[in-house]
Image (spheres, helix red, strand yellow):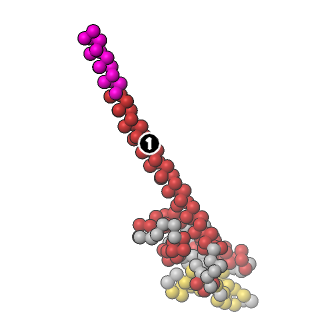
Amino acid sequence: MKHLKLFLILVLTCLLFAACSNNGADKESEQLTDDTTKATVADKAESNIAQQTKEYILKGQEDIPEARQLQWSETFLNQVDIDAIYKKYIADGGKKDDIKSFAAYLTQNAPTPDNWQEMVKSDIAKDYDEKVSKIELLQDDLYQVYIEKDGSEIPYVVVNSRTGYYHG
C-alpha cells in the first residue's frame, strides 16, 4: 500500500510536470504565430501603402490646385521601389499611413532612374508622337527637352528627371 501511494504520487507529479511544460510550449507557439501574423499584416500594409500612394499621386489630388499637385509620369512611378522608400520615410520619423506626407517625401527622395532619359523619350513619343533630339540640364533635376521640327531643333518641354513629369 505504501508503494502504491508512492507510485501514484510519482505518476501524478509526472503528469503535472508534463502539462506545465506543454503549456509553455503552447504559449511560445502562440507568440510565434502572433508575430508571424503581425509581420504578414505589416507586409500587406506596406504593399497597400504603395498602391494607395500611386493612386493618390496619379488620381487623388483633384481638390488641390494643379500648380501644387505632386506630378509624376506613371512610367516613372511604376519603376520606384515605393516600399523601400516608405521604410526610410518611417525610419526618418514619418507618420505611418499618412499618404499625403509620404507622397511628398517620395517625390523629394525618390532616386533618379538610371534610364530616365530613355523613359522620357518613350513617354514623349507615346504621348505626342515626337522624337527627342537633345536633353540639356537646366538646374538640379530639371532638364530642357528638344525636338526637331521643320529642320530646326526647338525646346519642347522641361522634364523632372526624378519624377518624369514634364510640361512645356
Question: Label 1 crowding class (10 Å Cα cut-off): few <14, some 14-19, many 20+?
Answer: few
> What residue sits 61% from the left and 82% below the top?
64
> What residue sits 25% from the left and 11% below the top?
2
Q: Nearer the viewer, residue 56 or 13?
A: 13
Outermost residue toward the top in this view: 1
On the image, which quarter does residue 63 sit in?
Answer: bottom right
On the image, which quarter does residue 90 sit in?
Answer: bottom left
Q: Nearer the viewer, residue 21 or 139?
A: 21
- Quarter of the figure that contains the C terminus: bottom right
Residue 65 vertical position relative to residue 76 in the rendered view, above or below: below
Residue 31: x %, y % from top left: 42, 45
**For this view, does 96 lie left or right of residue 13?**
right
Residue 46: x %, y % from top left: 52, 61
Residue to which mark 1 is pinned: 30
- Quarter of the figure that contains the N terminus: top left
Q: Which range is magenta?
A: 1-16
Q: Give the main secondary structure, helix, strand or loop, of the magenta stretch.
A: helix
On the image, which quarter does residue 19 sit in?
Answer: top left
Q: Is residue 32 a member of the stretch shown in magenta? A: no
Report how many numbered discs are placed on residues in the image.
1
Outermost residue toward the front in this view: 1
Residue 81: x %, y % from top left: 53, 65
